[in-house]
Amino acid sequence: MINEASLPLALEAPEWKLPSSRKVAVVCLVLTETCLFSIFVAAYLFYVGKSLTGPSPREVLELPVLSTICLLSSSITIVFAEGAFKKERKRLFQLLWLLTLVLAAVFLTMTAIEWHRLIYEKGLTISTNLFGTTFYSLVGLHASHVIVGLCLLLLVLIFSLTGSLAQMHRERIQMISWYWHFVDAVWVIVFTVVYVIGR
């Protein structure tokens, strides 16, 4: 007969630890932002094709293929940068992190160029019609998140170049990476809704 004293130690329940407060915070942030973007996407889809005046999406929108490639590529570079950081390959980390930052900056620059063309050449402003209102609201909301991410990327690069970044900050790097993947994933939805379905 087996009693409690004869049970192997391996069967003891592992000690439960609280999850990281940073990870919980970022997950909550992502869930909240997902709800916010869902509202804007739903509004865009609801009002698409209901503008009483022009221009329409088909008349003015061009597929932002290059900027999309840049943004999605930045998700790849940040993964490799995070891996380099874990392996303490400082120079490689800085290079890949800088590349991520540059790709994000190119995306924002191309978004600004698109908006300039739409406003000054096509006459589409946020008050032109329902399309203009929903387009600038949705794409602008995403662009604001890219700007926040760009600021975070820049701060990390500055801290790394000044020697203020250490392995103890690894989880913080990971959280910024999570946020950046979220921003990229949202762009896939925005791209599909605005430039594919909405046209």
Image (spheres, rainbow, N blue to C red):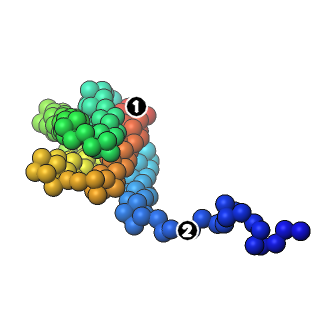
- Between the C-alphas of marks 1 and 2, the distance is 47 Å
In the image: residue 23, left or right of residue 143: right
Residue 56 at x, y percent in the picture: 31, 35
Q: Which residue is mark 1?
A: 196
In the rendered image, the residue lying farthest to the front is 6
In the displayed structure, would residue 51 be above or below residue 159? above
Percent position (x, y) of residue 29? 38, 60
Residue, x 43% and y 44% (percent of image)?
45
* Mark 1: few/some/many CA within 10 Å (<14, 14-19, 20+): few
Q: Type of residue at label 2?
A: Trp
- Which of disc 2 and disc 1 is earlier in sequence? 2
| Residue 64 pos. (x, y %) | 28, 30
User: In the image shown, does 105 or 92 lie closer to the viewer?
Assistant: 92
**Does dot 1 land on a helix, a strand or a loop?**
helix
Q: Mark 1 or mark 2: which is in front?
A: 2
Left or right placement of residue 21 versus residue 59 in this view: right
Q: Point out the image quarter for the N terminus.
A: bottom right
SS type, badge 2:
loop
Specify the quadrant of the image occupied by residue 23. bottom left
Q: Residue at x 40, y 56 (%)?
A: 30
Q: Does 79 appear above or below 59?
A: below
Quadrant for the C terminus in the image: top left
Which residue is denoted by mark 2 in the rendering?
16
User: Is residue 190 something one can see in this rendering?
Assistant: no
Mark 1 touches mark 2? (CB < 8 Å): no
Query: Residue at 32% across / 45% down in the picture?
Result: 86
Tell me the residue at 18%/37% (across/down): 91
Position of 145 compared to 187: left or right? left
Name which residue type carries label 1: Val
Along the line of sight, which residue is nearer the eye, 192 or 18? 18
